[in-house]
Image (cartoon, rainbow, N blue to C red):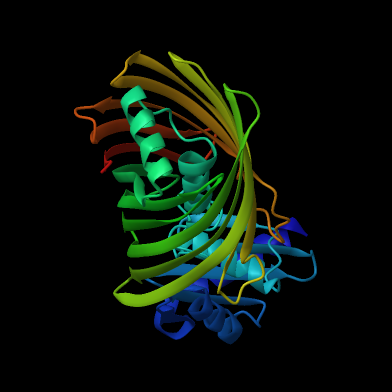
């Protein structure tokens, strides 16, 4: 039986090599919808050969031995169910570098849902510790009922994925908040620019939030946060434009213990997001837990160390591999006057098999 399969494969390869013009049609696919149309047109037969985005794809089904072979470029996959439409589309999209459900993909730390989860956690649930000068000035602003800014920063992230799909993510974040007694209401406005090997993208969004502060003792405070968010991504791949909408919300809780020289914070956050793509795995449930410790070197200087763990609780239809990861980092904050502060930080994603990233960010705040 194995010999028969080998003979069939050899005959197919021979025919594909001798008659490439007759056996191999060329297509361009910029997204999953276009890739699905190519699948519907060609994959109804047991064997075939096509070219998508300059990459050769061929498949062969041996019904007698119940075996299959799918080859995408120089990668060979055996025992793939050719008639499982979404599984085949997903596999080919990953090999060709076609964005899945967002710029990069839904299950990566740079996706819209993961970025929203990170911003909510680091800016609202377990923020880095402020200098004494910042903390006192913020207390005055809250007492006056003034609108204040927070979380303003520029960031650059170097991303290294498996294979040749690497790139750079640059962006900024700005937050506005208004305090009423024990409540804080506000909005965060993030922007990111993606420059990857296979695509470029611009992503902008808004995160609306409300937070309740519960003072347990003079040193201990609990916070409860709810948010709604929306992200719009406009990306360009292989010379073609496409866009994506991502929306969702979440609930979070945090705890902070404050002393004159140091502060300890910890929290947990749940975030749900969905993309507007016609694909079965178009939503994500993320749970994030983490902690931060900040030590005040002087009243105008503080050093922070932090770590978070993100657990992907989504019940996916298909196996996306490793989707849980840790983030670790450090931040230095300094006040140069009563109203102006500067912070610089480093954050790294670890514990993912096919993904590695390093982020550097620079932030500033003016407290009027």
Q: In the rendered view, tell whether residue 13 sits above or below residue 158.
A: below
Picture coordinates of residue 206, whole percent (x, y)? 43, 62
Which is more toward the observer, 202 or 49? 202
Q: Residue shown at 48%/76% (left/top)?
A: 50
Which of 279/69 is in front?
279
The image quadrant that residue 343 belongs to is top left
* Vertical relation: 204 (above or below) 261: below
User: Residue 311, how many percent across, how many down?
Assistant: 64, 42
The answer to whether 207 appears left or right of 196 in the picture is right
Quadrant into which the N terminus falls: bottom right
Give the residue at x 38% y 45%.
Answer: 144
Quadrant position of residue 61 = bottom right
Q: Is residue 249 above or below residue 297?
A: below
- Residue 334: which quarter of the image? top left
Locate the C terminus and report the quarter of the image it occupies: top left
Viewer can see residue 17: no
Q: Which x, y percent locates residue 303?
A: 37, 20
Percent from the top left, x then y, of residue 336?
A: 19, 27
Q: Across the whole image, how many numbered discs are drawn on residues? A: 0
Vertical arrangement, residue 301 with respect to residue 328, above or below? above
Residue projecting furthest to the left: 336
The structure residue drawn at horizontal position 56% and vertical position 48%, both measured from the top left corner, is 211
- Residue 225 visible, this orientation: yes
Q: Residue furthest front?
A: 144
Residue 113 as seen in the image, left or right of residue 348: right
Of residues 187 and 27, the one drawn nearer to the viewer in this rendering: 187
Q: Is residue 87 left or right of residue 330?
A: right
């Amino acid at each position: 039986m194995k010999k028969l399969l080998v003979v069939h494969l050899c005959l197919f390869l021979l025919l594909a090599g001798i008659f490439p013009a007759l056996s191999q049609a060329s297509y361009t696919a910029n997204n999953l919808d276009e890739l699905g149309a190519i699948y519907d047109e060609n994959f109804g037969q047991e064997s075939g050969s096509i070219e998508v985005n300059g990459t050769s794809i061929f498949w062969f089904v041996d019904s007698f031995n119940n075996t299959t072979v799918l080859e995408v470029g120089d990668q060979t996959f055996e025992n793939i169910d050719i008639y499982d439409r979404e599984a085949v589309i997903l596999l080919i999209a990953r090999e060709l570098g076609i964005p899945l459900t967002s710029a990069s993909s839904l299950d990566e730390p740079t996706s819209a849902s993961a970025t929203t989860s990170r911003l909510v956690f680091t800016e609202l649930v377990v923020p880095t510790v402020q200098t004494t000068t910042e903390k006192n000035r913020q207390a005055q602003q809250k007492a006056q009922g003034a609108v204040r800014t927070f979380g303003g920063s520029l960031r650059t992230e170097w991303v290294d994925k498996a294979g040749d799909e690497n790139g750079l993510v640059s962006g900024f974040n700005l937050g506005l908040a208004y305090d009423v007694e024990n409540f804080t209401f506000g909005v965060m406005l993030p922007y990111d620019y993606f420059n990857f090997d296979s695509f470029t993208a611009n992503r902008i969004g808004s995160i609306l939030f409300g937070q309740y502060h519960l003072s347990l003792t003079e040193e201990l405070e609990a916070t409860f946060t709810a948010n709604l968010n929306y992200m719009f991504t406009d990306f360009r791949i292989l010379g073609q434009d496409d866009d994506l909408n991502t929306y969702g919300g979440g609930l979070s809780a945090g705890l902070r213990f404050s002393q004159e020289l140091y502060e300890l914070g910890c929290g947990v956050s749940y975030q749900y997001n969905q993309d507007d793509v016609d694909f079965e795995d178009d939503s994500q449930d993320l749970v994030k837990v983490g902690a931060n410790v900040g030590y005040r070197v002087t009243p105008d200087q503080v050093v922070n160390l932090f770590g978070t763990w993100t657990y992907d609780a989504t019940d996916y239809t298909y196996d996306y591999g490793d989707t849980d990861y840790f983030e670790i980092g450090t931040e230095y904050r300094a006040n140069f006057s009563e109203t102006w502060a500067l912070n610089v930080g480093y954050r790294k994603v670890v514990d993912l098999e096919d993904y590695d990233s390093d982020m550097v960010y620079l932030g500033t705040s003016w407290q009027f």
